[in-house]
Amino acid sequence: MSRNKLLTGAALPLLLTLFFSLAAFLYGNPGFKVDKSQHGLWISQVTNSQLNPVQSGDLIIAVNKIPYSKVLGHLILQTTPSTSNTITLLRKGQQITFPLTTIPFTLSSFLLLVWPHFLLILLFLTLGSIALIYAPPDQTTRLFFLMLCGFSCSIASTLVSHTGIMDPSLISMSFFCLALSNWLAFGAWIHFAWRFPSERDLLKKRSWPAALFYLLPPAATVSGALFAAGFNPEFWSWLQRLRNLFLPLIILGTFTKHLIDFIKLPPQPAKNQIKLPLAAYWLTFSPYFFFYLLPNLLIDRPLIHFRTVILTFLFLPLAYLFALLRYRLFQVDRMISKILAYVILIISTTLLYSFFLIVLKRWIWGNQVLSEELFLAFLVIVIALFNPLANRLQKTIDRFIFGNKPYPPLLLNKLSRQINTALDIPDLVQAVLLDMPKYFAIRRAGILIMDEKTNPLPAKSPILEPKKWASSRLSNKLRGHNDYFHCHTVANDPQLTSELEEIRQAGYSMVFGLQGNSSLIGLLFIGPKINGRLFTSEDTHFFATLANHTGIALENSLRYESLSKSKQQLEELFEQLVQQKKMAAIGEMSMVLAHELKNPLAVIRSSAQHLSTGKSSPEIMQEILTFIIEEVDNLNLTISSLLGHARHRAPIFQPIEIQTAIPALIEKWKLSAAHTPDIHIDCDIPEHFPTLYTDMSQLGQILLNLIRNSEEAMGRTGNITLLATRDQDMSVIRISDNGPGISPEDLKDVFKNFFSTKTRGLGLGLSVCQQLIQAHNGTISIRNGEENGAEVTIRLPFKPQSPKKQATTPTTP
């Protein structure tokens, strides 16, 4: 049956409401209300005592001189009523008969009388329509709607007694409509209970038990009435009595079925679907059992009005609706505990106020009226204490009845700190897989990293395979507006339901998305609680916070791992580059050695061969021997230069006054045989130049190497200038000459190892100078002059950052 057709079924209770409302309005107001009992119509309330001599508690046993049992079956018996409009009532054992007086209803007075019925009918039909439209389209939703339509018809049928209509035809019609609608509603109720929830559907598309639910109550009631009264008029009063008697069995049966469902269902949302209706049963039917049904059976008079029973009955369909819509399933315990806390406080406040009145009036004020100020003070105290007491009582109920203990905030802080400080993925995985279950009393936890290239977790089960979930429906949902999912059925999404069921089969209850800055980078799986209880909304928010921390930590760990791999690759590339440079340097050195050693060795060999003939004069032999010694010295110098380039010591910094140390060095150079006498060297250093922390032996080696290069480039004559200046915290030494300079194509290579423009030389001089300057935390550069010559600029810090050794007083070589 389609939803549209079912929605049109709501027209039946609306039509009944319209019919009985119109009949009551036209009949008039008798000034009292009645409720049906086993032996008559019980006057429940007198609204106008001036119209008819009735009192609350009177029992009407005849209408228009027709006995009550015949009034109930009047539509079938067709009893001829008296022409006079009278009622006969029983009061304290005496029968009283009098003509019934009515006055016309005004529209406002009529609506004021019947608005609770209209409101309840509207609420029932609204609840059924909401379930039909928004709940999953299955058989239980349709049965729920049918049940509420039946109960709406029952409420509409009670308008006759509620407005005090004393017309036998209308009373009989109300009786039959009430009986039929009750049987339909209770049949649909049993049918619904046996199929709800879907995890405990006891019918499984078997139709014959469902037929019994609708046929057995009326059949048993009619059979019982026939057995008790036969075909006598008393049959109808027995029908009324047995119809009410059958109701407790229906309530007890459905309650027992749901109780068994709650026991047998595993800890999943379906268990919470049952929990709220079970609590609603007590709140709904306790007033009916103890204040309406039992007094009606025992003293033939209920203690509360039937409309009060109907009002309490609203809680059960409301609870069923929440269960069908799966509304806040993980806050059911909290909802129940809050309701219990409010009910306990309301009852306690009422009893306290009653006791307060009794004590004060009896022992203090007597019969005097209590002041408004005292009542106001009591009201202020109640308002001030109500909410704190309700919260405290609710927490107590949560802990001792439902066993829901909130997680201590310190645990969240502790695990969050552990997760946030985990740079390595194995540390993060340990915090999730081992520490999270231990801290929060859950059976297991799991983490899945979407990038399988960086996933360190072995796929022990298909649930942890990244390929499976990267493009899944679940991942797409988590990339959207959803932060998490509980592993249960999702309406109108079979693919997502299938994926969540697979996760549940793997032993997990919830799954959270681990979000990075721009994408979903993983999934966090949370297993069930060790105590078997469901997670509350507070638990869910708690784990959602942990999932946020885990997502940030996971992204940081992935970046750290990526940087570590990049660093390792760079180190490997650097080692390869260093090795290549070493091999290139060895090859270049071999070529230089071959060139520098070949000619001297050839000269030595030819000289030795000449000496071996013994034909040379002593003078020639001495000249040849001197030549051999010079060539050996040249070879030794070449090898020493290579060894000096391969290993040079770290500088030992000392405070040096270079305005005296460098001129002294140049004077020694001028006295050496290597200096060209016709080349003039000019040294210009300010007299009060700041102290320079340097290794003077290495600085002297650098300066003499540069001066030697300038003299060799200029030939026999020329000028060399050495100038020292200060640039903030740096000393600047410039050495310039007026030689030919350096060609532009060679200028970029002068600091390379083994590069030389000389016919003889290893090409290590400037390279060694650069290494020594860098060891001093300085720089060296070379360029051609504006007119001719070359200029070398050395920049050295006055105080290097990490001196190896410093003397306390300035020294001069």
Image (cartoon, rainbow, N blue to C red):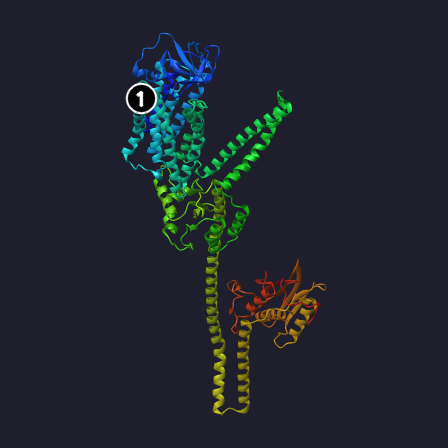
Side (left or right) of 368 relative to 290: right
x then y, percent, for residue 753: 52, 68
Q: Which residue is mark 1?
A: 229
Residue, far front? 93
Camera sees residue 789: no
Camera sees residue 337: yes
Q: Is residue 218 above or below residue 84?
A: below
Mark 1, Cα crowd under 10 Å, few <14 / some 14-19 / many 20+, is some
x then y, percent, for residue 540: 47, 42
Q: How many marks?
A: 1
Residue, far top? 83
Q: Amino acid at mark 1?
A: Ala
Side (left or right) of 697 relative to 150: right
Name the residue rendered at 46%, 68% in the picture. Answer: 584
What is the quadrant of the C terminus in the image? bottom right
Q: Secondary structure at mark 1?
A: helix
Name the residue rendered at 35%, 43% in the picture. Answer: 498
x then y, percent, for residue 223: 29, 26
Q: Nearer the viewer, residue 331 or 136?
A: 331
Q: Is residue 185 above or below residue 576?
A: above
